Amino acid sequence: MTYQDIIRQLSALYETGEARAIARLLMEQRFGLTMADVLCGKVSELSADDQQELQKIMKRLLQAEPIQYVLGEAWFCGRSFHVAPGVLIPRPETEELCRWVLESAASDGTGTSSPRILDIGTGSGCIAITLAAELQGSRVKAWDISDEALRQAAANARSTHVEVAFEKKDVLRCSPTAGEAWDIIVSNPPYIYRRESVAMARNVLDYEPHEALFAPGDKPDVMYQAICRYAGQTLRPGGSLYLEMNPMLTEAVAAYLPTVGMQQVETRNDQFGKQRMVKATKTTL
């Protein structure tokens, strides 16, 4: 099998650019071949064992299984995270949200004062682990409702050599406890409406966990409101909430935040021009 054979087969499922990106990732991460190696024809020179492995991988890819699950890893903010079925694959848009948190922490001094951070809906742990690694002295807790996600996130924290306290907890069914106080709350919650699934790719719908994609009860607005209320009750004065958004709800959530004691509401577009992120600050005393 040649490199062009791989791209041709993948192009039956993906646009050519994405097919090329998947093929390149496969060659680099599984077989250790650079693009220079590929251009020199070394794909067709793989050993018999590697060729057999390549055939097995292609069979999985041609069933629309995400390359990240096939390889068992996804990159996020320069770090490798183990991912497998049962955990949402980290997205570039979430990297943008995470970078916003880090930029703000550096500019307002939050990152130099041992901030207490909560990640709601942690999935693979990519946000919580990145913040724990980048903000020295931070104390990070992460919630999820999925046992499998929490298991994989804890393993990722161990392999990254950071400390994150993981807890099975549902923001829709929790109340603040005495002494709870956070400097930063960040969340990429399930926010997709079921009706949006008609436009979603097969590799997402068939393989990624629906509880991490679709809002409970098909009501992402209720999920966002619960997070905003909790943030309004538990953020320290001057603390900030960061949300990854369903763009259809960004304006509504931005309007809702002041009603729960949040101010300085900001929105940001993602790299595709969609209104994907919201930040708000707890009212100061």
Image: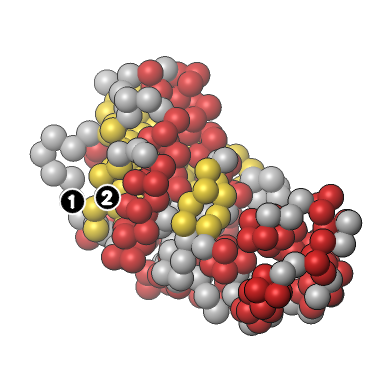
Please identify the quadrant where the C terminus is shown: top left
In the figure, is residue 275 to the left or right of 116? right
At a point 82% along the width and 69% down the height, the residue shown is: 44
Quadrant of res 59: bottom right
Secondary element at tag 1: loop
Q: Which mark is residue 175?
A: 1
At a point 57% along the width and 69% down the height, the residue shown is: 70
Mark pair 2, 1: CA separation: 17 Å
- Please name the amino acid that badge 2 sits on: Phe
Secondary element at tag 2: strand
Q: Residue 32: x, y in percent? A: 68, 55
In the figure, is residue 190 to the left or right of 46? left
At a point 32% along the width and 29% down the height, the residue shown is: 138
At a point 40% along the width and 23% down the height, the residue shown is: 111
**Residue that carries the numbered disc 2 in the rendered image:** 166
- Characterize the local packing of mark 1: few (<14), some (14-19) or many (20 or more) Cα atoms within 10 angstroms: few
Closer to the eye: label 2 or 1: 2
